[in-house]
Amino acid sequence: MDINKALKEEHIYEAGTFDVAVIGAGHAGCEAAHAAAQLGLKTVLFTLHLDAVANLPCNPSVGGTAKGQLVREIDALGGIMGKVADRCAIQMRMLNRSKGPAVFSPRAQMDRADYSVVMKELLENTPNLTLRQAHIKDILTENGAVAGVKTEAGGIYRAKAIVLSSGTYMEARTIRGEVIVESGPDGLPRSEGLSSCLKEEGIPLLRFKTGTPVRVNSRSVDFSAMEIQNGEDDIPPFSFDEEMKGYKVMPVSDQIPCHSIWTTEETRQVIKDNMDRSPLYSGVITGTGPRYCPSIEDKFMRFADKERHLIFVEPMGRRTNELYLQGFSTSLPEEVQEKMVRSLPGLKDAVIQRSAYAIEYDLIDPTSLKLSLESKILSGLFSAGQVNGSSGYEEAAGQGIIAGINAAMKVLGKDPVIIYRADGYIGVLIDDLVTKGTNEPYRMMTSRAEYRLFLRQDNADRRLTPIGYKAGLVDEERYNRFCEKLKMIEDETARLGSTYVAPSDELASYLEPLGQTPPKSGVSLAELIKRPGVTYEGLKIIDKDREELPDYVTKSVEVDLKYEGYLALEMAKIEKFRQLESKALPSDIDYDDVKGLRIEARQKLSKMRPENIGRASRISGVSPADCEVLLVYLEALRRKNNE
Amino acid sequence: MFAACSTPAGISGIAVIRISGNGCIELLDSYVRTVRAAGGKKSLKELSGYESLYGIINDPATNETIDDVMVTVFRSPHSYTGEDMAEISCHGSLAVKQELLRLLFSAGVEPALPGQFSRTAFINGKMTLDEAEAVMDVINSDSSKALRAGRKIMSGALARRIDTAESALYEAMALIEMMVEFPEHDDTSVNEEKVKSLMKGAKDELQKLSDSYSMGRLLSERIKIALIGIPNSGKSTLANALSGTDRSIVTDIPGTTRDAIESNIAVRGIPVTLIDTAGITSTDDVVEKIGVERSREAFSSSDMAFILIPPEMTLEEMKDRIDIPESGVYKVLVFSKSDIGDNPDEMRITEYAGSKGIDKIIHVSGKDFSNIEEMEDAIEGFYNASGSGSSEGLLITNGRHMTLIERAIGYIGMAQAAINDGMGVETCSSVLRSALDEMGQITGKTVSADLADTIFGRFCIGK
């Protein structure tokens, strides 16, 4: 609604003037608000409920494959998710340890209640940031740009930029069998009115579905029927800065274990007998659900040949008995849920504390966004998180920090900060969402990244901290620490390259058990590290006088050297990618005017209006030849403008 | 750097290979042994723009001479593309052109993309603004030509093999992604073995392809054309008409041509091996039986086949006596002896032929050679469609395919090494992507950006 019109309504008052207003204090909203405030902008963060800031309504965990990389990237940029997660972790693991370092993925179980409290406290102590519990009913505009928001209580908050991070709350309803309730997740109120306001602005909306499993009381659980899964005690923190400052690992004995179980034949039977009551199959649910996080009934239906499915039993905190049944989300009726849970090993007498549900919600079609996460339709409106079609806390936070930075840049009149596909998972995530769109909640996976060897969790700071520093989110002190780390990596890499060792019995006795032929003449330490099985640590026997360096330095040195050849191959691809990405396409280009484009390409380009040739090339229907044509067109345009 | 043969396809006296890109003169210099150069200069590097030298190009792998050539050097910006350029004038045999291009491609030079010379020239300001539109038109028309050519070639055995290799690599990558993405569901040792065997399968398949090229059939770049028909349908007459010689005994006694007779001829400058066969038919005559068997072989090893239907042949007779194999061969139905009269059953035969995958239908007389041009057109059309007649030439298309396949094999080898050396499955997967990128340049497919989606349709996974 136009702000001047809103001001004339009854029971309205001017509640304040801000640079940036963030709607929703989930994982996207918290990062966005923190980033904007850190950049010196007067920021307000709205939430429907202050006790649910950074709520973890589903998995009580942060990280995992691809998600762990995202958390490290957010931290490298100067975000907060990693720091909060480090403080609230109750169990830590490094996934994929048996594979290569590119896919090592940190994951930690969270104390869910702590997480919310710690985040809230951090935000409360962030300068320039105001937290406000309020129900936002309308986004106000003036002259085609955002001008503020209106609360249910009649407050008008003026703002120059808005970040919408409303998660799964917009016009949400939860579903358990035949029972449908207008509600947000976790019994929280839903957000009403924003959808119609977005529609009025001409912003295209979609409707998705997701879900969550039941929670049970651990007192009613027999753990002896389950397989225990302990944490690990050598995991570095998510936060690079904490890692550099020095950290204490939590011994396994202080960590809380998870457990795993398999579904039984009885589980399958219960589900089969009650499928007619599933809202997914009866047609009650119309939203599109995530394929990568399907409900248990979905798994049994779609993969009928699989007799059983794996379920993880995860603790929800230190001061609660609640357990989360990962992999067991469902939208079947409550009474069926009870039978299903009790069919599981060790859960025969389980007491359910919260039931599972599916939730449907409105979201913005992300193809209506720019790479900066600003709407192409309404100037000054940014959006991030599940409202953009993603799934997961980490995906939300990754967008949140970018939306927050760019909302600030917009107000400051500066160029947006863009993370490209070759820079990080955050870049892949945003590029995928806004270029290709999505027809289901988008989950990050490492296979979505074409430069996976380069986009590792261990080098996220090397990729992104300079960007965070340039944007102003990483402070001088931290940046200096980072530069010291870089210097150490460089020096040690150079030293290994120039330190030659002569053949010796010691070297032979190290290499032979690894199946390596000992060298017959002098060889550099760097060359030795490249051999299969040889490690930096192992070479210590012939490199006795070396300086003790921190793990985060030696690990990086080792990976860089060991994977040099493979990385070079990937870097060559990245170089090509960057060249195309740097060829900007003017936003007012008339594609009908570009001779030589095929018709399909012309239509797609007119609709999507990509920012550069690289993005154009990823639109289905645009061929390499069409991109060549565009390159020629760009050159012709440049010359015309010069004339 | 990119290169292509700029003279028309087919055998000619001399041919010109152009190479563009800064540094290309230095690169070429390492392959050319100078015999005599302008102003007594010793090497290519020393030449100024527009100067030439006479030299010998050796294959460094075998140290055998490929050809003696004239190389002209153009220095940036005074060249067609505005970059450093060199033009190699070599002898016009197909083998020489192909070997030279293979040499360049293996040295890291890229096969020129459709319209790349013109586009580069334009970008570097060597063409006026007025020419921009023409350049843009050329890019897409050349590229659709190349794609069509690719598809033609891709309709045969090459396509099947590349498909097989591609599917195996995708399956290997799917397994790797499952291991990486869902470690808790992972059964690494079993899956890793599967990945290894899939990679080996793909590599073997591609190696077979690569071998078939090097063995020489395609190196000679002759089109093999089979003439197929029942005895006395006019095959030999047509063969003679096309080749201008009397290679077969032409009589009115059916079955005169008992053996598959091969003759190398040139049709409009296009090298053709014509296989004049006995008809494919059921017979009790022992001698004829051998001939028939050979005909079948001839058919299956051909690139193109003319199936002759004389005026008196009915559809039933055709079904009974001519066996049209299902294969990637480009098949042309020829209503022969049109000088004697039309085939009353033509409509039905045409309809039936369509259902058997016939690509083209023509009418031709064996006696007065009326419409013999139509057959020549068909041959030229096929040759062009195979890539030769498009602006960059068939040699490139094939030499290019060879190069791409060899590179893909190299990457698969690297991926195998990665997994054997314990570098992690994701490293293996990254290199496999490169292999698929190379193969995609033949098939026109790009490596699926939505790999994840392809994969997870197949597995039951969830967090």
Image (cartoon, coloured by chain):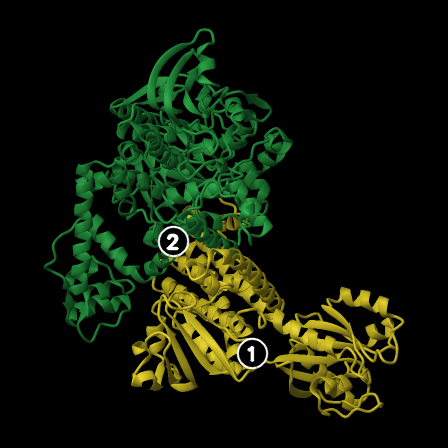
Chain colours: A green, B yellow
**Residue drawn where x is 16% and y is 64% of the image:** A498
Q: Is residue A132 above or below residue B382?
A: above
Q: Secondary structure at mark 1?
A: loop
Q: Is residue B272 left or right of residue A249?
A: right
Amino acid carrying label 1: it is Leu
Q: Is residue A309 above or below residue B373?
A: above
Amino acid carrying label 2: it is Gln
**Residue drawn where x is 23% and y is 67% of the image:** A511
- Residue extending farthest to the front is A643
Numbered disc 1: what chain? B
Q: Nearer the viewer, residue A308 or A474?
A: A474
Q: Could you say which disc has been placed on residue B218 in the image?
A: 1
Q: CA distance from mark 2 to mark 1?
A: 37 Å
Q: Is residue A260 above or below residue A163?
A: below
Residue mark closest to the camera, 2 vs 1: 2
Q: Could you say which disc has been placed on residue A579 in the image?
A: 2
Residue B66 location (% of width, % of height):
43, 84
User: Can you tell which quarter of the image residue A281 is in?
Assistant: top right
Label 2 neighbourhood size at 10 Å, few (<14), some (14-19), many (20+)? Answer: few
Numbered disc 2: what chain? A
Label 1 neighbourhood size at 10 Å, few (<14), some (14-19), many (20+)? Answer: some
Q: Is residue A387 above or below residue B354?
A: above
